[in-house]
Amino acid sequence: MIPPKIYIGTSGWSYKDWVPNFYPCQQSSTFDFLKYYSGYFNTVEVNSTYYTYINPQIVEGWINKVEEKDEFLFTIKLHQDFTHKRKYNKDNIKSVKLILDKLSNAERLSGLLIQFPYSFMLNKENANHIKALIDTFPEYEKYIEVRHKSWYIERFFNFLKENRSALCTIDQPEIGQAVSFNPVIAGDTAYIRFHGRNEEAWTNSIKSSGQEQTYEQRSERYNYLYTPAEIIDAGLRIKEILNAVKKVLIYYNNHPKGNAAANAFELINFLIGSDVIKIPETILKAFPRLSNKNK
Amino acid sequence: MKTIFHLDMDAFFVSVERILDPSLMGKPVIVGGDPNGRGIAAACSYETRKYGVQSGMPARTAYRLCPNALFIHGHGKEYGRYSKLVKKFLDGYFSVVQQASIDEFSLDFTGCETIYGDALSFAKRIQSEIFNLFKLPCSIGIASNKTLAKIASDFNKPMGVTYVPAGKEKEFLAPLPIEKIPGIGKKLLPLLRTRGFRIVSDIADTSPDYLAAILGKFGLDLWEKANGRGNDLVVVEHERKSISKETTFDTDLVDKAKIESILFDLTAKACQLLRDENFQSSTISIKLRYSDFVTITRAKTVKNTDDDKVVYDTAVDLFRKAYTRRVGVRLIGIHLSKLSSFGEQEVLFADENVIRKRMLRAVMKIRGKYGYNSIHIGKN
């Protein structure tokens, strides 16, 4: 049995509040966030593509910046027009495919993350909607994030397997009909997202959904640092499924203040081992509890 | 003959604190309590023990003995998380895991040699796996019963494994000081010492009738334990069946009002636990032990409740009827049983009690956030 390839990273890299906890204060004129980031992680999940259609030239820039890395994969999150607003046309599809193809041709694409709203539950209309989106992007690997318990049935898992898609396992505060952390295997890839467990801010954000929000307001619900026990607990659960898949993609989305990076290092340490892990001084200074794991 | 493991986490709270903050490594650490105020040192690192600090002593005393120690408040939630992780790990190896407390486990290894190899090497393996996986040190005692395994686990801490072979129980126990026997605490110890008991063999060699005469049934149990015998039944914990709170007085009490006020306090604590776990109780009992160890229990059935007032009124009534002798009281306790889950739909039948129930829930929230002593409910 060949052990699966494990990719661990964060949801996004371009956060100003990751200085000084991850990115250093002293930056030279040639300093670049993505270059620095890719020196430590082998994957990143791009969330900006959910809000805007990104200029393909910017994507070319990303590819150049990670040139020196033997292995580095981008996961692209599908624009909200497709998943939340359900209003898209040929041009929208074309502009998404443009960047997917750029990354894919450079062998830097992991796949397409398709995230549905919390309230999106299993019914005929929604099932058809998922099917339509999967059929729109047949040439890429797809990761489907549905958070409503109603989707957690064998029939849906099989449907995903047959359609080159994987089910996204998420960890978030357990509220209402949201699923709890339980890695499920559907397909050859396991895709896991950690959103943090800031229950209070999460509840508030559900109440104020649809309203115009600042970056800080939007970020608050991800403001959470997993404790070592929670990392171990999740790590043990992930270990249980490792032999059943070929590829594992794991992203921490609890981005405020670099918490996501710190937790990602902790999980790498737990799953892969302390001898291969490289942790920057900035993180060790901001999160002293990681220091004994570096030895 | 059974083979029982007792696994005891070494300075558990301190070990977890050191995972959360590795700068505490190698330093004297005391968890719980305020060095200048009241409160108890819930756990202390081995570095503090050479100064005479022990877990369970007042924080102020601990501070006097070891003023260099770092006092930290503690992260209760994290202890629970790690405890669960260790339990889950043990569940993977043993068919029966009995959790004796947050940091202690009884495990039945009987008959497992064919699968896991000999008990001693397997215990060492479990110990190192727990350390590698969670960075938590533990000590393990192996013996033919639970009490002896527990004593053995304490024999060589930290990171010790102590094996008491069958037939060597008495020999192992004989030279140990009597306070190593679980159940002999700071109240019983002086009583036994003044009667000439210093080491376990002093107890084992005396007549069981004498111990029964001075300590009642507990004396007989003690004699059995000192002779290396004890309960060897490892049972899986089931859902909580009852809640008890009891206290042994420093000096025997005769003042009825004082006892009732302590009973009130115990009731409040028991009811808080009841509400924390979303239970209601319908059987309320009290336990009363006189200074000569004569013990009386009295119970009454009431309508399902989690209300301090209802419980206290019932309990104090039981106490007044039960307290008939003109002898000092050594222990008082409250016991709530016949538990059932509290259903929120009861609010549909609104009456004046609802307001009280809401108040009690608010009290529970405040205590959850700021601790038990942050708010009290008056007696009347």
Image: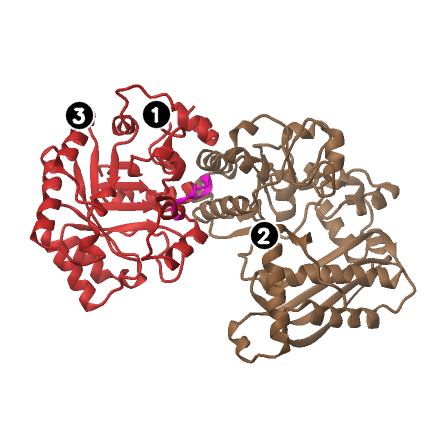
Image check: B49 left or right of A85?
right
Report the amino acid beneath label 1.
Answer: Lys
| Placement of B70 over or under B9, stated as above or below | above
The reply to whether dot 1 and dot 2 touch (C-beta < 8 Å) is no
Which residue is labeled 3 in the image? Answer: A67
Helix, strand or loop at disc 3?
A: loop
Extreme right residue here? B326
Can residue B281 be seen at all in this image of the molecule?
Answer: no
Residue nearest the viewer, comparing B96 with A8: A8
Percent across and percent down for residue A292 are 46, 27
Percent across and percent down for residue B268 are 70, 61
Label 2 packing within 10 angstroms: few (<14), some (14-19), many (20+)? few
Please, which chain is the residue tagged with disc 3 on?
A: A
Q: Which of marks 3 and 1 is nearer the N terminus?
A: 3
Does the stretch in magenta take in A223?
yes
Which residue is labeled 1 in the image? Answer: A278
Q: Are marks 2 and 3 on the same chain?
A: no
The quadrant of the rendering that contains the N terminus of chain A is top left
| Placement of B108 over or under A70, stated as above or below | below
The quadrant of the rendering that contains the C terminus of chain A is top left
Report the amino acid beneath label 3.
Answer: Glu
Can residue B250 be seen at all in this image of the molecule?
Answer: yes
Q: Classify residue A204 by image quadrant.
A: bottom left
- Chain ID, brown in image: B
Percent across and percent down for residue B154 are 64, 37
The reply to whether dot 3 and dot 1 touch (C-beta < 8 Å) is no
What's drawn in magenta, residue-wise? A221-230
Marks 1/2: CA–CA distance = 39 Å
Residue nearest the viewer, comparing A78 with B240: A78
